[in-house]
Image: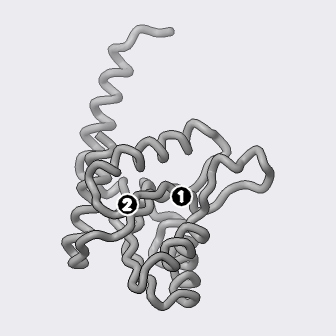
Amino acid sequence: IIVQMMNDLIRQCMIRNHLNSPSLVVLDHGSPIKDVTEVRNRVAQNLVAHFSGSVTPASMERRKGDEYLFNEPLLTSVLETLSQEKTICQVVLSMLFFSPGRHAGEDGDIAQICQKAKEKNPNLEIYRTELLGAHPGLIDLLHQRYKEAILAKPL
């Protein structure tokens, strides 16, 4: 269900910005918990079937230390790599965030990372989807999971 919601938000972004085959980056914050990153990677993997351009999972940031390398690649390096591959590089950031906060907000950390990348690479065009929290299906999904939890037998 999450993949379908992300797909909806990506398609809306592509239509709104008249994009045909952009590179797609499935972006999350980055987590100290490996399972969270694996979910992001699985979402990206499932989106591959829906898009003709590349699909890359990425973290906005990660904690220092080799034990957090599972969050790689970081958005900064993905944008740099993608911008070197094409003359004009259109990238859609699929925002795996529920609310804007200081990271995913209009002038947040992600916007600043994108601005720096565009300053380095003028051929880079970056478009952001609405946040996952904005998808109308999220309320239904949370309600469904709540009902399932209530009916589930205790472990």
The residue lying at 40 percent from left, 79 percent from top is 89
- Whether label 1 touches label 2, CB < 8 Å: no
Label 1's element? strand
The residue lying at 29 percent from left, 34 percent from top is 143
**How many neighbours does mark 1 have within 10 angstroms: few (below 14), some (14-19), or many (20 or more)?**
many
Q: Position of residue 93 (x, y in %)?
A: 41, 66
- Is 29 placed above or below 126 here? above
Label 2's element? loop
Which amino acid does the dot numbered 1 rest on? Ala
Instruction: Determine which residue is flagged by label 2.
Output: 131
Query: Splitting the image into 4 quarters, where does residue 106 fall?
Result: bottom left
Q: Position of residue 99 (x, y in %)?
A: 44, 58
- Is 109 placed above or below 152 here? below
Q: Is residue 151 left or right of residue 73?
A: left
- Is 59 placed above or below 31 here? below
Which amino acid does the dot numbered 2 rest on? Leu
Instruction: Determine which residue is flagged by label 1.
Output: 58
- Is 79 placed above or below 42 here? below
Q: Which label number is shown at residue 133?
A: none
Indicate the quadrant containing the N terminus: top left, top right, bottom left or bottom right: top left
The residue lying at 62 percent from left, 39 percent from top is 34
Spatial CA distance of label 1 from label 2 is 15 Å
Closer to the chain start, of discs 1 and 2, is 1
Q: Position of residue 145 (x, y in %)?
A: 34, 29
Q: Is residue 46 left or right of residue 56?
A: left
Q: Residue furthest right?
A: 65
The residue lying at 48 percent from left, 40 percent from top is 39
